[in-house]
Amino acid sequence: MKKCILLARSNLRGAKGQAAAITALILFAAVMLNLWLMLSLDYKQNFDRCHDRLHAEHVTLVVDEDSPDMRDFLKKSLEDDTRTDEFAFDSVLHMVGSFDYNNGNVNSELVILEKETALTRSIGRVEILEEGSAASGVYLPVLYKSDRTAVGKTIDISIGNSTMTYTVCGFFNSVMAGSHNCSMCALVLTDDLYAELERSGHAPRATLCSVRLNDRADSESYESGLKNTVAARYPAARTVSNSYALVYQSRYISQMVCAAILSAMAFFILLIALVTLYSNITNYIREHMTNLGALKALGYTGRQLTAALMMQFLSIALLSAAAGAGLSYSLFPYLNAMMIAQTGIPYTVRFLPVPYGITLLLLGSAVAVTVWLSSRRIKKVEPIVALRRGMQTHSFRRNHVPLETAGMPVTPALALKTTLSDFKRNITVCITMLMLSLVVVFSGLMTENIIRDTTPFLNLIVGETADSCINVQEDIEDDFLREMAADQRVEKIYLYNSLEVRHAGGLGLMATVCDDFSKVNNPKVICEGRFPRYDNEIALAAKYARENGLKTGNEITMTAEGREAAYIITGFTQTTNNLGKDCLLTLDGYRRLGRLSNASYYLNVAEGTDIDAFHAEVTDRFKDGVNATVNVAATIGGATAVYVSLMTILVIAILSLSALVITFVLFLLVRNMLNHKKRITASKRPWALPQASSFCRRLCPSCRQ
């Protein structure tokens, strides 16, 4: 063992530049790998820890009716279902609303609770994370914390067609309603403002039903069945709901994207490091063949020489991996801040032994296998052959480019001969450039399609976009359409109303009802087939269709409001807005299931039109007939700003890291090539052992004297 340590120390002293480059590559790989493992193994588990700590719901249902009959009906329905573990009811206010967010607006189904009720709920209580001194105001989910909404500042919240101004008292954490990605967003008001809003009638009273299940895996099917049961009994009641599965997926979209990118980067850098390591070891053997022969002649075995290389590179790998994994903890708070901006779930950074251990084990094992594979040649080399610099008395290697018969100028002939004579170095260069090309091209595509031009990204995330969305009551619908048709500012108006229907025997789907799909602004929502045209046709989400084995032309039965009808699938949609659980229906198609008590219309307005002023004018004209107005462009800008900023930071980090990796790899390749040329030049001089003498002086203490 002592001899192996001496050999390893000697090798390290003689190749400091190589050791530094390998150290840097392993360090980068360890940083990426440990960050990925922390995100994958522990970060999503934080949701479950928070869910258990707050005794949160598995299914949440809000019904716009708060009567004893409604609660009795819900209680009986919940008790009759054997999957129910426990449930609770709370009185809340419910209405569509919006407020400023990320230099835009966020629009969501607002569930407004009184502070004491929110803090003392038996199921799904909220926790205050930050609180100011103001005695009257609003508490916002921690997701919306920013400089503009800091504690003590005021915020304008549009509730229905009215705007309320509140002082921000603090921020809270709610697992199932702490983000617009949860289908509903909770707001907490102090008791005086809650009573004032209740008296104003801007947000109707509603029943908040919170349910915990025996098995949370049943959350989606339970939610769909419960909502369908309520719709059958109270078809006119407006409802909104979510489930554990939906919230768990929707709140961790950025985490999944970031984890996938980090894992790919870790794999690419590790592969480049291993290929470079393999090339350097084979080059080392080729350069120090005479020294290896001298050591074998002195009694060293091939196993000892291989063990010295193993000790040398494994020590570099483990120390670099330990340092890289440790360095990742200094970077993780910045990554965590970006994640919280999308998840809205607070996370405490702490040491995680499992990801750290896996990082060391994986990198150490990969380096050990690479060293073993690349150093096997040492055992086969005889001392006399090694002392001749590895040259056999006879060589039967093919001369790919004989210079005397090449038929081309000497310079390109020599270049071609050098290229073909070192096949392993060529493989190293090819794999390295392939990996780096993939990384750079991926970064370029993200820059073009997400950062510079957000249209493709918006089409995928949001689906349909417009300038304005106005929701009106059924009784003023004809007057509203007539007024909009006569308004010169309105270029196009079409029904685009979303509500939930249920696939019979399946899950609940978000159905978008349109009076004429030829008017939509984004026809690429359909990725296969066509939009529905007739009342017996439907377009289904491609993800949901694939999971259930459905194809175009198949018949599917949908239910809503206690009725069901069969539809023919005409096409598949592809958006991420509803996590692959959506469908498209014509207005006549939905009327086979129920009727619209209110309708949302999308509008394209003339360029230069002030959308907010336009909304104020429409609201003033139709009064209570307008339920809500949405500035779609501002809402999309606020919702997508988080993803765009996250992708921007990731692209910059990836490109910077790629530049560093290219620098280190080129350093090693050029260094090896120059050493190879020097060895070839030295082999043309009379045979001597200067390298062996120098090597021995470094290795043996007595020789150094």
Image: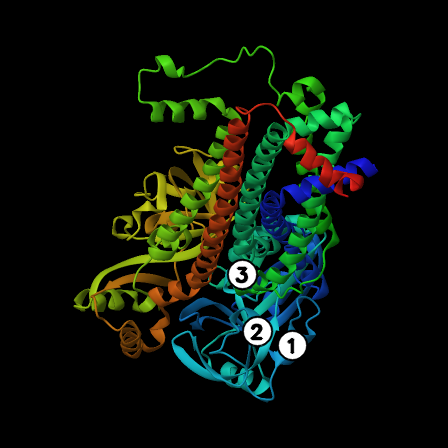
The answer to whether residue 103 shows anywhere in this view is: yes
Residue type, mark 1 in image: Thr
Q: What count of labels does the image hold?
A: 3
Mark with earlier residue (2, 1):
2
The answer to whether residue 76 shows anywhere in this view is: no
User: Residue at coordinates 61% horizontally, 68% vertically from top-left?
Assistant: 174
The reply to whether dot 3 and dot 2 touch (C-beta < 8 Å) is: no
For label 3, the residue is: 182
For label 2, the residue is: 92
Q: Secondary structure at mark 3?
A: helix
Mark with earlier residue (1, 3):
1
Q: Nearer the viewer, residue 646 or 578?
A: 646
Residue type, mark 3 in image: Cys
Looking at the rendering, in which quadrant would you find the C terminus? top right
Crowd class of label 1 (few under 14; some 14 to 19; many from 20; radius 10 Å):
some
For label 1, the residue is: 117
Q: Is residue 317 above or below residue 683?
A: below
Q: Is residue 360 above or below residue 365?
A: below
The reply to whether dot 1 and dot 3 touch (C-beta < 8 Å) is: no
Q: Give residue 304's position: percent from left, percent from top.
A: 77, 30
Q: Nearer the viewer, residue 392 or 486?
A: 392
Q: Nearer the viewer, residue 338 or 244?
A: 338
Q: Give residue 510's position: percent from left, percent from top.
A: 46, 52
Residue type, mark 2 in image: Val
Looking at the rendering, in which quadrant would you find the N terminus? top right
